[in-house]
Image (cartoon, rainbow, N blue to C red):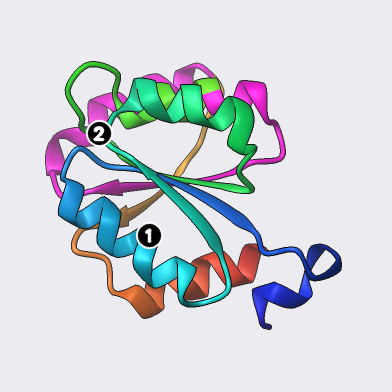
């Protein structure tokens, strides 16, 4: 299903947070070219700040970032916008402790392993639109 046909023709909004700018910018470009309205930021704190006004349908965040982790940003964004779908990216196997802590707090987020193939990401987002 083409995501542009959902929500009365409004493009689903995706907020991307990754401290690796090339990853965030590339994912934003791919999503913007495929029927989504994507915004990119480079920290968990900036993701929370941006979510307040951008009001994303999806948050796509790197698990491990300096300062606020992607998991903490996801929890704050989900608390602020309960309908926001959370997808987390991880290139590190050491994220299990962070995920366990999130689950204890009542959050069970979906993880995509880096490097994520663009088609895999698009399929996940479209399935949830």
* Residue at x-position 28% and y-position 52%: 24
Dot 2 or dot 1: first in sequence order is: 1
Q: State whether residue 26 appears in this view.
A: yes
Q: Which mark is residue 28?
A: 1
Q: Quarter of the image for the N terminus: give it.
A: bottom right
* Residue at x-position 45% and y-position 67%: 31
Res. 70 image quadrant = top left
In the rendered image, the vertical position of residue 76 relative to residue 112, given as above or below = above
Task: Rate crowding at label 1 as few (under 14), some (14 to 19) or many (20 or more) other CA atoms within 10 Å.
Answer: many
Q: Is residue 104 left or right of residue 82?
A: left
Q: Which mark is residue 98?
A: none
Identify residue for label 2.
96
In the rendered image, the vertical position of residue 71 relative to residue 76, given as above or below = below
Res. 47 image quadrant = top left
Q: Gap in Å between the C-alphas at discs 2 and 1?
A: 26 Å
Residue 95: in magenta span? yes
Position in image of residue 122 (x %, y %): 47, 73
Q: Is residue 94 left or right of residue 53?
A: left
Q: Nearer the viewer, residue 65 or 11?
A: 11
Q: Nearer the viewer, residue 98 or 20?
A: 20
Q: State whether residue 121 appears in this view.
A: no
Q: Nearer the viewer, residue 114 or 47?
A: 47
* Residue at x-position 25% and y-position 25%: 97
- Which residue appears farthest toward the bottom when viewing the image? 1
Position in image of residue 115 (x %, y %): 19, 63
Residue 78: in magenta span? yes
- Of badges 2 and 1, nearer the viewer stands 1
């Amino acid at each position: 299903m083409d995501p542009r046909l959902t929500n009365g023709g409004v493009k689903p909004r995706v907020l991307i947070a990754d401290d690796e700018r090339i990853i965030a910018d590339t994912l934003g470009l791919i999503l913007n070219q495929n029927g989504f309205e994507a915004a990119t930021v480079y920290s968990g704190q900036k993701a929370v700040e941006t979510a307040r006004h951008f009001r994303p349908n999806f948050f796509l965040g790197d698990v491990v970032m300096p300062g606020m982790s992607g998991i903490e940003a996801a929890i704050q964004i989900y608390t602020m916008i309960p309908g926001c779908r959370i997808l987390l990216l991880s290139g590190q196997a050491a994220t299990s402790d962070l995920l366990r802590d999130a689950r204890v707090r009542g959050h069970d987020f979906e993880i995509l392993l880096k490097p994520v193939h663009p088609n895999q990401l698009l399929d996940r987002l479209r399935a949830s639109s």
